[in-house]
Image: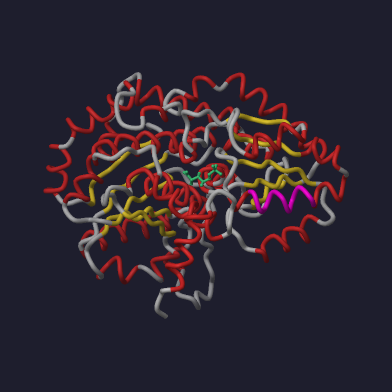
């Protein structure tokens, strides 16, 4: 079976016909991406990256082994594209309760909760820890605040010299405060190349170092991405890619403004978060783009189910289904059958979940919410690598079909600049003054 299949069984015929008529445009957009001739073409380093990672991968594995030898916990400091890729892979490959043999990996700098930082300090109190601080720009406030706090904490525990051995910075080759700080303090560093934006950086050291520290199969992850890259870009086996892109664009053109990423395996919850950033930041501009959201089924059928079945008809679902069971656990027979569940006895829980999915797909289609089903053969490192690469290419191609630059994020900058100004960062005085005036004139 192919790594990824896309099925449009639960999409109306007219949408499928419209999607078919978009295929020429989709193919053109794919070629624009590969030939690097579209807007944002200076950010296409990720396209063939899985082929160019051998040397870096060795360095990542060496650094991971070194960090593992001195610390039990890795604190990964980053936000947005400097956080979600690693988090998505770890949540997917980790056991729910049993972690692999490597380091415990925890995250910080992905929000500004003071309570979280204090509780993290308490959690780390009796644990040897290391830090991987990640910021492409090297100036983002959330990770900078967390890193200042954690750096001081580590230095107070093990001294400045040992702390410097336990801190690895992943950042721009030359620019930004983090690069300067890392060089002054003598930290090991990994580079985020200029031609790779945050949300496309999961196969750079941004995503791979934390995954390697945890002890997962980083080569397998990258191997899966490479296999998908070759399938799509070299072998020309693009049916799944083009079907997904053309169908979501046809649905959007037909007034479906929301794409809901649905999964029946909760390990995918952060793939959903990563996917939201990827598509939301890439397509949401110039007054256009699908609004992207995520939902865990069957859990959220007990909260969102009513709306999806019966509410405003402005959304569609993209269901990621893992075909191979992760477990063969079955429902047991109970001689008393007081819970009336013996009709399920002998069935695997996976099968129950599958029937729930099929029933939901049919019900939602009947209620007017169409679904695209992306079938992933299994949930191991290569397949996760393949799936993430598939989505990155789908996003780039889809952005070009939509007519936007899928590689910039001017909207993210707006809030960052306002925050700098309101926090009175030097250089932002005029903007700060204007914003404070605006705030003082606000009504209740
Ligand atoms: O995609 C983006 O630009 C953002 O989500 C960034 O990834 C996020 O703001 C973190 O930026 P940086 O890596 O520069 O700290």
- 287 vs 328, left or right, is left
The dominant secondary structure in magenta is helix
Left or right of residue 74, residue 397 in this image: left
Q: Observer-nearest residue: 164 or 428? A: 428
Q: Please give the range of residues in magenta.
A: 144-152
Give residue 419's position: percent from left, percent from top.
52, 57
Residue at the image point whose x is 37% and y is 33% from the top: 393
Q: Is residue 148 magenta?
A: yes
Q: Pick whichever, 411 or 423, lies toward us.
A: 423
Q: Quadrant of residue 134?
A: top right
| The quadrant where residue 353 appears | bottom left
Residue 408 at what x, y percent from top left? 39, 40
Quarter containing the C terminus: bottom left
Q: Give the tally of numbered discs.
A: 0
Percent position (x, y) of residue 226?
47, 25
Relative to the observer, which residue lies in front, 125 or 18? 125
| Residue found 28% across the figure and 43% down from its top | 7
Image side of residue 247 versus residue 132, left or right = left
Residue sitting at 51 percent across and 35 percent down?
201
Examine the rendered structure and indicate whether residue 262 appears above or below residue 238.
below
The image quadrant of residue 386 is: top left
Magenta segment: does it hold 16?
no
Which quadrant does the N terminus fall into?
A: top left
Vertical comparison of 371 with 161: above or below: below
Colour scheme in the image?
secondary structure
């Amino acid at each position: 079976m192919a790594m990824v299949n896309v099925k449009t069984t639960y999409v109306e015929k007219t949408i499928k016909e419209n999607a078919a008529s978009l295929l020429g445009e989709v193919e053109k957009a794919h070629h624009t991406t590969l030939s690097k001739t579209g807007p944002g073409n200076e950010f296409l380093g990720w396209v063939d990256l899985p082929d160019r990672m051998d040397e870096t991968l060795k360095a990542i594995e060496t650094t991971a082994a070194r960090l593992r030898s001195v610390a039990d916990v890795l604190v990964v400091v980053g936000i947005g594209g400097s956080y979600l890729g690693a988090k998505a892979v770890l949540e997917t490959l980790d056991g729910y309760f049993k972690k692999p043999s490597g380091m415990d990996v925890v995250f910080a700098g992905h929000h500004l909760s003071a309570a979280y930082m204090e509780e993290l300090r308490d959690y780390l109190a009796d644990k040897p820890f290391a830090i991987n601080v990640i910021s492409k720009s090297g100036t983002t406030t959330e990770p900078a605040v967390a890193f200042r706090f954690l750096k001081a904490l580590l230095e107070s525990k093990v001294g400045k010299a040992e702390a410097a051995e336990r801190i690895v910075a992943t950042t721009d080759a030359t620019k930004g405060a983090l690069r300067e700080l890392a060089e002054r303090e003598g930290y090991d560093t990994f580079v985020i190349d200029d031609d790779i934006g945050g949300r496309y950086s999961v196969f750079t050291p941004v995503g791979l170092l934390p995954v390697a520290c945890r002890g997962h199969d980083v080569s397998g992850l990258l191997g899966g991405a490479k296999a998908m890259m070759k399938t799509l870009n070299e072998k020309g086996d693009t049916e799944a890619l083009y079907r997904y892109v053309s169908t979501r664009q046809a649905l959007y053109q037909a007034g479906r403004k929301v794409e809901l990423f649905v999964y029946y395996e909760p390990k995918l919850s952060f793939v959903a978060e990563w996917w939201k950033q990827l598509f939301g930041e890439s397509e949401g501009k110039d007054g256009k783009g699908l609004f992207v959201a995520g939902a865990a089924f069957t859990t959220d059928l007990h909260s969102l189910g009513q709306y999806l079945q019966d509410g405003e008809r402005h959304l569609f679902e993209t269901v990621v289904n893992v075909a191979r069971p992760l477990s063969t656990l079955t429902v047991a027979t109970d001689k008393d059958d007081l819970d009336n569940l013996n009709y399920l006895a002998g069935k695997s829980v996976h099968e129950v979940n599958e029937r729930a999915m099929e029933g939901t797909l049919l019900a939602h289609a009947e209620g007017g919410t169409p679904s695209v089903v992306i079938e992933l053969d299994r949930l191991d490192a290569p397949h996760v690598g393949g799936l993430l690469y598939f989505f990155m290419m789908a996003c780039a191609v889809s952005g070009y079909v939509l007519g936007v630059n899928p590689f910039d994020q001017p909207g993210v900058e707006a809030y960052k600049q306002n925050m700098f100004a309101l926090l009175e960062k030097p250089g932002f005085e005029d903007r700060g003054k204007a914003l404070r005036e605006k705030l003082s004139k606000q009504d209740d």
